[in-house]
Amino acid sequence: MIPVILSGGNGSRLWPLSRQAYPKQFLPLVAEQSMLQETLCRLPVAEVEAPVVVANNEHRFIVKEQLDAIGRKPLSILLEPFGRNTAPAVALAAIEVARQDPKAIMLVLPADHAIEDVEAFQHAVARGQDAARAGGLVLFGITPTRPETGYGYIAAGQSEGAPGAARPVSRFIEKPDAEKAAALLSAGGYYWNSGMFMFRADAYLAELKKHSPDIYDTCLLAARSFERDMEFTRIPAEIFEHCPDDSVDYAVMEKTSKAVLVPMDAGWSDVGSWSAIWDVSDKDEDANAILGDACMEDSSNCVVHTSDKLVSMLGVQDLVVVDTKDALMIAHRDRVQDVKKLVNRLNAEERPETRNHRQVFRPWGSYDSIDSGNRFQVKRITVKPGERLSLQKHHHRAEHWIIVRGTAEVTRGEETFLLSENESTYIPIGEVHRLFNPGCIPLELIEVQSGAYLGEDDIERLDDRYGRATPAPTVEEEQIPLMSEKV
């Protein structure tokens, strides 16, 4: 059985914590590990092979780092140049798997779900394998616990085998209103559609070809031009852009006669909103879910998430307060499904807070933009042991580096030298330079940039171990002052 992990979403309803450059699947929202890591760690290790991860090209180094951190070497990391929904993503993964074994069973899991009862999850997976081996397309239906309007429903017939065995799918029901959801719950035999699947690679591809041939043909053509790049497999953008945008449900499951449902009662949540975070989090005696430093007085049923400051709340109920280094969001718990409207509005205003956190993660480490003003910017930079930044130069800014922890190997022009704590160096405008951490602890430094222009596009990269190309600046980019980015 080969896990296929879908990791391409943006999680905009969990803004401002989840952002385009670092979305919710890479965050430790409900446990110490990220949701991607939790997804892999709950699998029955003895029964699964190396995973296939489908991710956005922009997130490739985050995926690689998080897999390395839990010791999971992937069969493949497929990089989408842009999203085309789940049906093409699963098709490309199936083609990759089928090259090794067409009859291999694929367990398709979104990377951003929470499961409380891991044992029950693993039992449901085991029950689905016989149906998948026989050519069935298995959906995992969640036993509903409330009249939920945020999920689609699946009607299933009676099982012909033991309790919990696969059942024939009768029909799919779109997200219902509250009255219809209550009626479905009362009637019984209906399950929430979890978005988790299991099937043989060849079985899925055959049904996709039958019911959505445009997706099948485009993905097959794209797979013939896969480009292997280090640990990654790039999907060609010039072909993939012509692929229809559709989900596994619409493209295959709602049309096939081979769909079966395996019930799952495992404390599942898609963690799709701040209300869902409240559902799965530990709570205090007043039913407040608190993540961070908070003081609550005469307040109940609230969600508080804070990373670097105290949040105090007095005499309020049913609020969501999320505080990050550069954004604060306050919402009523009944309106958290509409957070996406806020994100859409901020995107229309071209606000950077929907894309990046103030702390930005890179394959070599991270940087935090501490302060900025007219002709200057200050960053705190952290470089992981053994990692190095690209060899580069800037045409409009100078940089001053002050080491606060660890040891830095600095390349400046023709010279290379070491700097230790409390030592510093100056990089003039136009000077070729590079930073390397030769030590065994993280290197931390303060970078002070100064110059007439501090935009991200003022980087000429001469050499880079991560294979990143230097973007060519456009006239529009040169006219817009952006927060500089050390990449």
Image (cartoon, rainbow, N blue to C red):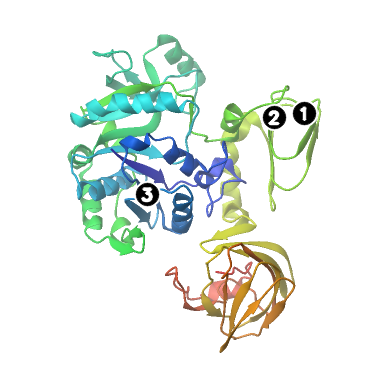
The part of the image, by quadrant, that contains residue 230 is: bottom left
Rendering coords of residue 161 (x, y %): 25, 14
Residue at image coords 70%, 28%: 288
* Distance in Å between CA atoms under marks 2 and 3: 35 Å
The part of the image, by quadrant, that contains residue 42 is: top left
Viewer-proximal residue, 344 or 413?
413
Q: Amino acid at mark 1?
A: Val
Viewer-proximal residue, 78 or 313?
78
Left or right side of 413 for 235: left
Q: Residues within 10 Å of mark 1 (few under 14, many from 20)?
A: few
Q: Which residue is mark 3?
A: 54
* Secondary structure at numbered mark 3: strand
Give the answer, above or below, for where 20 lies relative to 204: below
* Secondary structure at numbered mark 1: loop
Asked if the residues shown at circle 1 and circle 2 are in contact, with their CB atoms under 8 angstroms apart, the answer is yes
Q: Earlier in the sequence, mark 1 or mark 2?
A: 2
Viewer-proximal residue, 69 or 84?
69
Q: Amino acid at mark 2?
A: Cys
Q: Amino acid at mark 3?
A: Val
Q: Residues within 10 Å of mark 2 (few under 14, many from 20)?
A: many
Rendering coords of residue 48 (x, y %): 32, 38
Left or right side of 181 for 399: right
Most extreme residue toward the front is: 440
Rendering coords of residue 40 (x, y %): 42, 40
Most extreme residue toward the bottom is: 414
* Distance in Å between CA atoms under marks 1 and 3: 42 Å
In this rendering, the label closer to the viewer, 2 or 3: 3
The part of the image, by quadrant, that contains residue 118 is: top left
Q: Which residue is mark 2?
A: 302
